Amino acid sequence: MRNQTQYIIDEKGRKIAVVLPIEEYEELLADLHDLAIIAERRGEATLTLEEIKERLRKDGIL
């Protein structure tokens, strides 16, 4: 479904807006949301895979 992008141009032929399928628009919004979350959490401490597994075991999930 990609490559259905259409442009709106002004009287001089310059692209001034874009029209794209709603599915692609929604994917872009989801990507922007994910990037915002990543940016917000940038300063948080990270955990190793082993630490995550241990926490999951403690909580009875694994």
Image: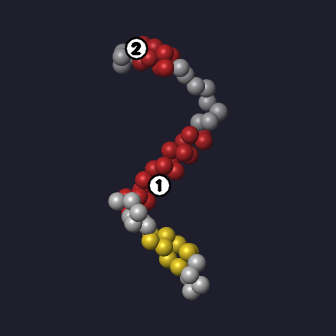
Q: Secondary structure at mark 2?
A: helix
- Residue 10 coordinates in the image, percent (x, y): 56, 82
Residue 45 versus residue 11: which sits nearer the camera?
11
Crowding at dot 2, Cα within 10 Å, few <14 / some 14-19 / many 20+, comes out as few
Image quarter hosting the C terminus: top left
User: Which residue corresponds to the image point at 49% horizontal and 20% vertical from the top-left?
Assistant: 49
Q: Is residue 18 above or below residue 48?
A: below
- When asked about the image quadrant of residue 26, the answer is bottom left
Residue farthest to the right, as pictured: 43
Confirm whether residue 55 shows in the render.
Answer: no
User: Which residue corresponds to the image point at 55% horizontal and 22% vertical from the top-left?
Assistant: 47
- Residue 27 coordinates in the image, percent (x, y): 42, 53
Horizontal side of 45 relative to 49 (left or right) equals right
Amino acid type shown at disc 1 = Leu
Residue 18 versus residue 14: which sits nearer the camera?
14
Crowding at dot 1, Cα within 10 Å, few <14 / some 14-19 / many 20+, comes out as few
Image quarter hosting the N terminus: bottom left
User: Which residue corresponds to the image point at 53% horizontal and 20% vertical from the top-left?
Assistant: 48
User: Which residue corresponds to the image point at 55% horizontal and 75% vertical from the top-left?
Assistant: 15
Amino acid type shown at disc 2 = Arg
Q: Earlier in the sequence, mark 2 or mark 1?
A: 1
- Residue 16 coordinates in the image, percent (x, y): 56, 75
Q: Secondary structure at mark 1?
A: helix
Q: Is residue 22 above or below residue 33?
A: below
Q: Which residue is labeled 1 in the image?
A: 28
Image mark for residue 57: 2
- Residue 12 coordinates in the image, percent (x, y): 59, 84
Horizontal side of 24 relative to 47 (left or right) equals left
Confirm whether residue 11 shows in the render.
Answer: yes
